[in-house]
Amino acid sequence: MIGKVVIITGASSGIGKALAKEFSHRGAKLSLGARRIDQLEILKSELKNSEILCIQTDVSQESDCKKLIDMTLDSFGKIDVLINNAGISMRALFKDMDLEVMHRVMDVNFYGTVYCTKYALPHLLVSKGSLVGIISIAGYLGLPGRTAYSASKFAIRGFLDTIRIEHLHSGLHVLVAAPGFTASEVRKAALTADGMPQGETPRNEGAMMSAETCAHAIAEAVKKRKRTLILTFVEGKLSVFLGKFFPSLLDRLTYNHMAKEPDSPVKSH
């Protein structure tokens, strides 16, 4: 990755921050986008890498996504990797949820990926680079109480799979990476039924895969130009397997698993 130009959205915390550190250690030039520009500047100072560009970016705004791509090109002259990582979650049953929550989650998770990809794609085709989408195991199975989140992650997977096929003979690499539950700030900022952040995570973050482990696996998948990456065995690989061959069983297991969360909107039976 030495000398490669890597754009990472949502780079101020969680997996995005860990990805920035991982690719910096591998010698890449970084263009980091996030709403919290102060956190990006702190990260830049920690990495002590002079070839890091920090750009305040709200990926739900098309103009911000275009600015992120344009400023990267102005500074580095090319794009080798785009990692669409920025995302928000939510926690409520669809019947109780304000539809504005659905719009907000789709705007950030799905349309943020669409906007950044639209403006970066011509340059990735030139470099025969990598287009990456960070989804979740929620992009393979419907998580009850995470309606908008699962919908957005399914949409990203379908979008990127189609981009891959459209450019099958162009040399473009497309990776769809699906971490399992990963320790990050995403659950603290998750939206409740009325659109307010829940503030506290309902899960034991210490028992989850670390963001650093996740970032290393994603970087290796980019290096090897893999098409899919499903992390964790039980939550990830086993769930996808069961979804293909025993879908009704997976539905029941998923329901029961999500119902065990503290204060879960999903009722135990």
Image (tube, rainbow, N blue to C red):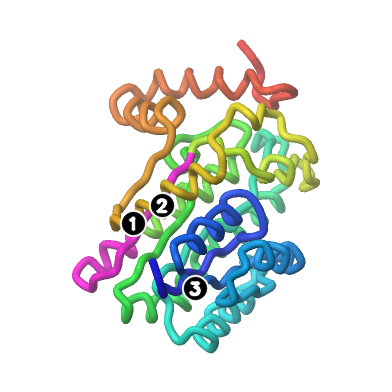
Residue under pointer 2: 157
**Amino acid type of the residue tagged 3 in the rendering:** Lys
Q: Is residue 10 above or below residue 259?
A: below
Find disc 1 in the rendering and name its residue: 161
Residue 165 in the figure: left or right of residue 193: left
User: What residue is drawn where x is 45% and y is 35%?
Assistant: 141
- Given contact means CB atoms under 8 Å apart, are the residues at marks 1 and 2 in contact? yes
**Mark 2 residue type:** Arg
Please check the rendered image and state whether residue 164 is part of the magenta-colored stretch, yes or no: yes
3D distance between C-alphas at marks 1 and 2: 6 Å
Q: Position of residue 262 (x, y in %)?
A: 72, 22
Number of disc labels: 3
Based on the displayed image, in which of its 4 quarters is residue 125 positioned?
Answer: bottom left
**Region rendered in magenta:** 162-179
Q: Distance of mark 3 from mark 1, alpha carbons? A: 27 Å
Q: Comparing marks 3 and 1, which lies closer to the viewer?
A: 3
Q: Amino acid at mark 1?
A: Asp
Secondary structure of the residue carrying tag 2 is: helix
Extreme residue toward the front, this view: 48
Looking at this rendering, what residue extends furthest in the left direction? 169
Residue 200: x %, y % from top left: 77, 36
Q: Nearer the viewer, residue 72 or 150?
A: 72
Q: Are marks 3 and 1 in contact (CB under 8 Å)?
A: no
Tell me if 238 is positioned left or right of 21 in this view.
Answer: left
Q: Does dot 3 land on a helix, a strand or a loop?
A: strand
Circle 1 crowding by C-alpha within 10 Å: few under 14, some 14–19, many from 20: some
- For mark 3, what is the residue? 29
Q: Nearer the viewer, residue 3 or 117?
A: 3
Residue displayed at 61% across by 38% down: 183
